[in-house]
């Protein structure tokens, strides 16, 4: 998304702006511990916040909404009780019907397919569920500059509840590849991408 | 006059500000969890105290100052995986399992963003400031970094490449700023005092 205007910097910003923010910071890991859910599920719960609510609420309200959603979905607490006690408690939207397409849920390959210097193109996938592949790099090509050891595939962890490790690649793009002629000639962007997001550029 | 103040304080004590919507929600979640025995006060207190007081940019500043003064350390820090070198100074933990330090040079200026959420190297920088997590920063730093850096008061010379790092997977990035000129006589501790959080995110130059 674009058009958000200037970055507003708060001078001498405190770590927590109010006691409730600190409580949410401490409560959230307890929710994850209790539900047995990991970061990909938590992030997905935040991504499922209704867009108007997401954009009009603060960072720790995102955490609160995400954590409460996971606790309700895991059956730890009851949504009606939560709603009654809070006088209204908007939760995140439900998981999409088909959140992860088959090829994004496929088993990870054991050997890295690419090496430093490989030219790769990001697959033009648009899954309905959780992913760590941002829109703006899809269908763009870049060069692998670093190969990292296996990390859990977020789509599989969030939607299938399994840990499956896969090589990730730090891929460098030119800004003009990403944004066209006004993209900042000579400037570049590096981003870490899971192997399943990438195709080789022949 | 002083009596008025006393009355006012007294009134405040008995009629506290009504809770905001979000505070009511936190209380609701917390009370339901507490009734199931799921609230560990000691854990919450330790988390909050650690990030409020002990874990912050002063840690990253020590890493930077050591790299400026110890060439062998700098080499270890700028290895493909910087985590062991950062661990040497006693910094590690949540959001720091795999850290990579990227060095500014006369040719390259690095800047870090997380477009998808708020990934940030907690062990060396603490928790991220609000602006780092805000939609304007996350959307614009990848789209027009030179414009946004200038807006934020960070002028990068035209002949210096800007290299944006979007921390989208498990690696957390820290920028190693260039050592400012005229600091040859300073001790490591004095150098650390010069290093700002923003210079280690890459939205400022020293």
Image (tube, grey):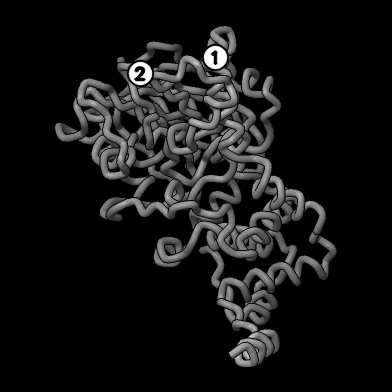
Residue extending furthest toward the right: B37
Local packing at callout 1 (Cα closer than 10 Å; few below 14, some 14-19, many 20+) is: some
The C terminus of chain A lies in quadrant: top left
| Left or right for B33, reference B91 | right
Query: Can you say whether B176 is above or below B40 in the image?
Result: above
What residue do we see at 65% from left, 72% from top? Answer: A79
The span from disc 1 to disc 2 (Cα, nearest Å) is 33 Å
Q: In the rendered image, which residue does mark 2 sit on? A: A143
Left or right of A164, for residue A189: left
Which residue is the site of mark 1?
B69
**Disc 1 chain ID:** B
Is residue B79 visible in the rendered image? The answer is no
Question: As rendered, which of A154 and A101 lies closer to the eye?
Answer: A154
| Residue B176, percent from left and from top | 47, 24
Q: Position of residue A189 (x, y in %)?
A: 34, 28
Q: Tag 1's secondary structure?
A: helix
Q: Secondary structure at mark 2?
A: strand
As drawn, B113 above or below B87? below
Q: Position of residue A170 (x, y in %)?
A: 44, 23
Residue for point 76% across, 54% down: B45
A133 or A6: nearer the viewer: A6
Residue at image coords 58%, 74%: A89
| Chain holding disc 2 | A
Q: Depth-wise, is mark 1 or mark 2 nearer the camera?
A: 1
* Mark 2 neighbour density, 10 Å: few (under 14) some (14–19) many (20 or more): many
* Nearer to us in this view, A7 or A155: A7
- Residue lying farthest to the top in this orientation: B72
């Amino acid at each position: 998304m674009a058009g958000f205007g200037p970055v507003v910097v708060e001078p001498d910003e405190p770590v927590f702006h109010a006691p409730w923010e600190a409580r949410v910071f401490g409560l959230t890991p307890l929710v994850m511990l209790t539900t047995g859910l990991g970061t990909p599920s938590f992030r997905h719960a935040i991504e499922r916040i209704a867009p108007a609510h997401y954009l009009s609420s603060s960072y720790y309200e995102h955490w609160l909404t995400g954590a409460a959603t996971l606790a309700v979905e895991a059956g730890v607490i009851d949504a009606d009780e939560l709603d009654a006690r809070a006088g209204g408690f908007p939760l995140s939207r439900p998981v999409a019907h088909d959140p992860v397409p088959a090829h994004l849920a496929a088993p990870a390959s054991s050997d890295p397919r690419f090496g430093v210097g490989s030219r790769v193109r990001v697959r033009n996938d648009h899954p309905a569920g959780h992913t760590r592949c941002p829109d703006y790099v899809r269908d763009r090509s870049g060069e692998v500059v670093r190969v990292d050891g296996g990390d859990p595939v977020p789509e599989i962890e969030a939607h299938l509840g399994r840990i499956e490790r896969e090589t990730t690649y730090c891929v460098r793009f030119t800004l003009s590849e990403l944004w066209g002629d006004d993209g900042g000639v000579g400037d570049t962007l590096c981003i870490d991408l899971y192997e399943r997001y990438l195709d080789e550029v022949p | 006059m002083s009596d008025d103040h006393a009355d006012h304080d007294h009134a405040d004590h008995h009629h506290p500000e009504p809770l905001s919507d979000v505070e009511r929600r936190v209380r609701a979640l917390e009370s339901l969890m507490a009734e199931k025995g799921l609230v560990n006060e000691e854990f919450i207190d330790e988390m909050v105290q650690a990030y409020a007081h002990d874990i912050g940019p002063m840690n990253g500043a020590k890493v930077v100052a050591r790299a400026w003064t110890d060439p062998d350390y700098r080499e270890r820090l700028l290895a493909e995986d910087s985590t062991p070198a950062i661990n040497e100074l006693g910094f590690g933990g949540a959001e720091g399992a795999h850290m990579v330090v990227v060095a500014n040079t006369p040719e390259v200026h690095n800047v870090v963003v997380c477009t998808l959420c708020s990934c940030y190297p907690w062990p060396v920088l603490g928790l991220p400031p609000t602006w780092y997590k805000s939609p304007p920063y996350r959307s614009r730093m990848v789209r027009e970094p030179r414009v946004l850096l200038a807006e934020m008061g960070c002028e990068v010379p035209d002949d210096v490449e800007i290299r944006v790092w979007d921390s989208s997977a498990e690696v957390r990035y820290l920028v190693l700023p260039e050592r400012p000129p005229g600091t040859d006589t300073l001790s490591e501790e004095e150098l650390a005092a010069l290093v700002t959080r923003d210079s280690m995110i890459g939205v400022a130059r020293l």
